[in-house]
Image: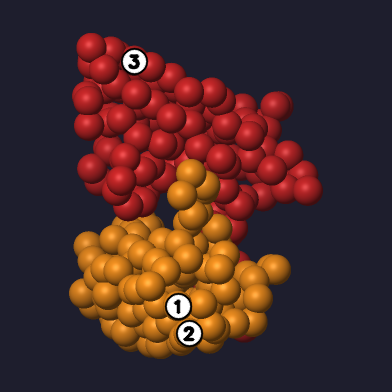
Chain colours: A red, B orange
Amino acid sequence: QVQLVQSGAEVKKPGASVKVSCKASGYTFTGYYMHWVRQAPGQGLEWMGWINPNSGGTNYAQKFQGWVTMTRDTSISTAYMELSRLRSDDTAVYYCARGVQLERLGYYYYYMDVWGKGTTVTVSS
Amino acid sequence: EIVLTQSPGTLSLSPGERATLSCRASQSVSSSYLAWYQQKPGQAPRLLIYGASSRATGIPDRFSGSGSGTDFTLTISRLEPEDFAVYYCQQYGSFRGFTFGPGTKVDIK
């Protein structure tokens, strides 16, 4: 079955970087975009960006430009999200989610159909 | 950037009742770009509806989506105990980016 398995929890100091991995299985990794979404404690969902695993092309939310880097390794069907210059308000659960771009009868559909369980990143001095 | 607003913030209902959740966009959104997700405490979000009205695989038919333009609705026809959760709408829009609404919490009355 389709699965996204994320790396384990991280504790980082302010100013450090964190790299979270997301290993895909059960489908063709290069056939779907991979999104990253984060959720601060008690807050809503915040979209960070996506990577096209086929081309390596990325699209980051404006807030995260210059600050986040999304990469992939197609040989092991794994996507990565690296966030630099961490601050305490980057404490959150970080999710990867498979992105579907579907064309049907001339309409294009965009949504996230499978999610990883999330990786907790805690930023604390 | 398109901003999504969800109302109400919290909906207190009893099992068996009907739930109507609203998602309003600051400008017109293509219906095919609108999705709904359910999130339970400690769990990842789960896709419910895509294209404003198409149920995702395995989603019970008590969940339905509707709307167009700037106003979209998620309806749960008869609440089951497992439906008490937070619901988010999401849209794909300008600069090929995605945004989520702030969520509506459906809790037990």
Chain under label 1?
B
Q: Mark 1 points at which residue?
A: B14
Q: Nearer the viewer, mark 3 or mark 2?
A: 2
* Above or below: residue B100 compared with residue B42: below
Q: Do the residues labelled 3 and 1 touch (CB within 8 Å)?
A: no
Instruction: Provide residue A56's location: percent of width, then percent of height.
Output: 53, 37
Q: Mark 2 points at which residue?
A: B17
Cα separation, mark 1 vs mark 2, equals 6 Å
Which amino acid type is marked by label 3?
Answer: Lys
* Above or below: residue A120 compared with residue B108: above
Cα separation, mark 3 vs mark 1, equals 43 Å
Tell me whether marks 3 and 2 sit on the same chain: no
Q: Classify residue B108 as left or right of residue B99.
A: right
- Residue under the image location 29 percent in, 82 percent down: B70
Q: Are marks 1 and 2 in contact (CB under 8 Å)?
A: yes
Q: Which of marks 3 and 1 is in front?
A: 1
Tell me whether marks 3 and 1 sit on the same chain: no
**From the image, which quarter does the C terminus of chain B lie in?**
bottom left
Which amino acid type is marked by label 1?
Answer: Ser
What is the secondary structure assignment of the residue under circle 1? loop
Cα separation, mark 3 vs mark 2, equals 45 Å
Marking on residue B47 = none
**From the image, which quarter does the N terminus of chain B lie in?**
bottom left
**Residue A106 visible in rendering:** no
Say which of A46 and B28 sits in front: A46
- Residue under the image location 26 percent in, 68 percent down: B9
Q: Are marks 3 and 2 in contact (CB under 8 Å)?
A: no
Marking on residue A12 = 3
Q: How crowded is mark 1: few (under 14 residues within 10 Å), some or many (20 or more)?
A: some
What is the secondary structure assignment of the residue under circle 3? strand
Instruction: Provide residue A116's location: percent of width, then percent of height.
Output: 57, 42
Instruction: Provide residue B35's location: percent of width, then percent of height.
Output: 47, 69
